[in-house]
Structure formats: structure tokens, C-alpha cells
């Protein structure tokens, strides 16, 4: 029954889904006050030189974009793949993908909680296979729903355990791509503290270990949400655009790259996520 309703919802035009998402965002934060307080607190940490007025604007924009992101996720999971791909209006930086493929060492895509992070893997998978690391929900029924929504042609899901890590290593050694949410807080002893917008955040060491073991190219990617439900622009850029990193990326290098992306679309970052929590 739920899947049938989600498929009906997914058939709605994206402008309608995003319009509903704006209303849903305000309702969500009205009932989940803890998430609202976290959003406010996180934005205060990163506001820097913003005036109070600009901070308020960013706060409300974040609420609206969070609501859009929640509803569009279900739509993207249950829309036909061809319909999802039509929503991608442009991909900036695809030349970095082709350059990485020419090296034959695999690609590590770092896709933070920014914009529509579901659509980047789907777009890439329409060209080449990719394995995506994901943390299964605690609720088994919800986990099945997530897997069904995310697992598409040429997308392999790798859980956040040793089995999943082995899948990522095998994938990279074949010269293929993996996708990781780099701002997901890792388990204890699987990360290091590193600065993120001037505040310490526990950050995974996995990216550096995978890159060092395989020689894979590390790329940043996110799906920018266009206004009025017009679709998405996918941005792809190197983690190290100036080629200054002499070794595998450190957690600080990863955070610096994420921060660079977030500054492009700060209102579309998921500020309600517990990025600064302890493992």
C-alpha cells in the first residue's frame, strides 16, 4: 500500500513536489523542535559575517530546502529512471570523470548532504556502474524501502560494515566508481576530529584509506536544486583542484572540500544533520 502511494506521489511534477516540500519543511520543524534547534545552532556556528537579517533569510531558506529534499527523495526513488534523468538539466565538470577513467584507477565520489544527493549516483550510473556506501536504517521495513528505492541498474549498495568496505575496495580495484557521503559521522575509532566551518567535526578516515590502497581519483559531486522545480544541475570537481595534495586525502582535506561545495549553495546543505555530534 505504501509503495503504491509513493509511486503515485512520484508521478507528480517536480514543481508540485517542491511546492509541497516547502510546506512540509515548516511543518516538519514545527513538530521536530530538536531538529530546528540543531539547524539554528549549526547555522550560528557558520554564519561568520552574516547580518542577523541575512542569517534569518538563510535559516528560512534552509527550512524550505530541507522540506524539498525530503519529499523529492521519495519521488526520485520511485520515479522511472528515465524520468529522473530528464530532471538533470546540466552536468558541470564531467571532464573530470573522463580524466579519472583514463587513469584506470577508479573514482571515489564524495557527495555530502548538499542539494539532491540521490540524483548524482543515478546520473553517473546511467553512464558507468557505481557502488554506493549507505547506512541501513534501524527499522527493517524502512530499510527494504530504502534499498528498493536506491538500488537501480548499475548501482550496487554497500552497507557500512566490513562487507561493504570490501565491496568498495573490489570495485575500485576494477577501475570502477564508489559513492560516499563524506559528512556522515563515522563510528568510534573510524574517524578523526577535523575543522569544518571553524568547528571540530568527527570525520571518516575511510576516504584516505581507500585512495591510498587503490590510487583512485577523489571527486566531489552534488546535485544543485534549481528554483521553481526546474530540475537539477550536477556539479563535479576534484577534491584537490590545484594538485597540491602529496598523499592520500586527510579528514581535514575532505572537510575543506565539502566546505568549498557548501559555500556554493549554503541554503541547500542539511544543517539539521548532526554533523558535529560525537560518535
Image (cartoon, rainbow, N blue to C red):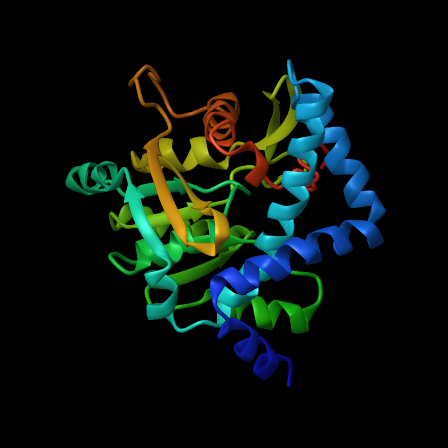
Vertical comparison of 49 with 73: above or below: above
How far from the left and from the top, in percent, is residue 68?
Answer: 59, 54
Q: Residue at x 50, y 60 (%)?
A: 15
Q: In the image as oriented, which residue stretches furthest toward the left?
A: 102
Which residue shows up at 35% across the image and 23% down it? Answer: 240
Which quarter of the rendering shows the C terminus? Answer: top right
Compare residues 254 and 34 and report the one nearer the observer. Answer: 34
* Position in image of residue 31 (x %, y %): 84, 54
Q: Nearer the viewer, residue 79 or 50?
A: 50
Image spot of residue 260 (x, y percent) = 46, 25
Residue 201: x and y, percent? 65, 27
- What is the quadrant of the N terminus in the image? bottom right
Q: Residue furthest bottom?
A: 1
Can residue 218 be seen here? no
Residue at image location 42% in from the left, 25% down from the top:
249
The answer to whether residue 234 is left or right of residue 260 is left
Is 253 rendered above or below residue 153?
Answer: above
Q: On the picture, is 81 further left or further right than 273?
A: left
Amino acid at each position: 500500500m505504501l509503495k503504491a502511494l509513493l509511486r503515485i506521489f512520484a508521478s507528480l511534477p517536480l514543481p508540485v513536489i517542491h511546492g509541497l516540500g516547502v510546506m512540509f519543511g515548516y511543518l516538519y520543524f514545527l513538530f521536530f523542535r530538536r531538529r530546528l534547534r540543531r539547524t539554528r545552532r549549526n547555522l550560528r556556528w557558520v554564519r561568520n559575517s552574516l547580518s542577523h537579517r541575512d542569517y534569518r533569510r538563510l535559516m528560512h531558506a534552509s527550512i524550505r530546502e530541507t522540506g524539498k529534499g525530503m519529499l523529492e527523495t521519495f519521488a526520485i526513488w520511485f520515479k522511472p529512471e528515465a524520468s529522473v534523468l530528464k530532471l538533470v538539466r546540466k552536468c558541470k565538470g564531467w571532464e573530470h570523470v573522463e580524466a579519472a577513467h583514463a587513469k584506470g584507477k577508479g573514482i571515489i565520489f564524495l557527495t555530502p548532504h548538499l542539494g539532491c544527493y540521490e540524483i548524482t549516483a543515478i546520473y553517473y550510473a546511467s553512464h558507468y556502474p557505481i557502488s554506493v556506501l549507505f547506512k541501513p536504517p534501524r527499522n527493517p521495513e524502512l530499510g527494504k524501502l530504502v534499498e528498493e528505492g536506491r538500488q537501480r541498474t548499475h548501482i550496487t549498495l554497500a552497507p557500512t560494515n566490513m562487507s561493504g568496505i570490501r565491496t568498495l575496495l573490489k570495485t575500485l580495484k576494477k577501475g570502477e566508481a564508489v559513492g560516499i557521503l563524506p559528512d556522515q559521522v563515522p563510528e568510534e575509532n573510524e574517524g578523526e576530529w577535523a575543522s569544518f566551518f571553524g568547528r571540530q567535526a568527527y570525520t571518516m578516515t575511510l576516504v584516505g584509506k581507500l585512495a591510498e590502497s587503490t590510487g583512485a581519483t577523489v571527486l566531489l559531486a552534488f546535485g544543485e536544486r534549481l528554483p521553481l522545480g526546474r530540475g537539477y544541475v550536477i556539479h563535479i570537481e576534484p577534491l584537490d583542484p590545484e594538485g597540491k595534495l602529496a598523499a592520500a586525502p586527510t579528514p581535514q582535506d575532505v572537510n575543506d572540500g565539502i566546505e568549498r561545495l557548501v559555500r556554493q549553495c549554503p541554503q541547500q546543505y542539511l544543517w539539521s544533520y548532526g554533523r558535529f555530534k560525537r560518535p
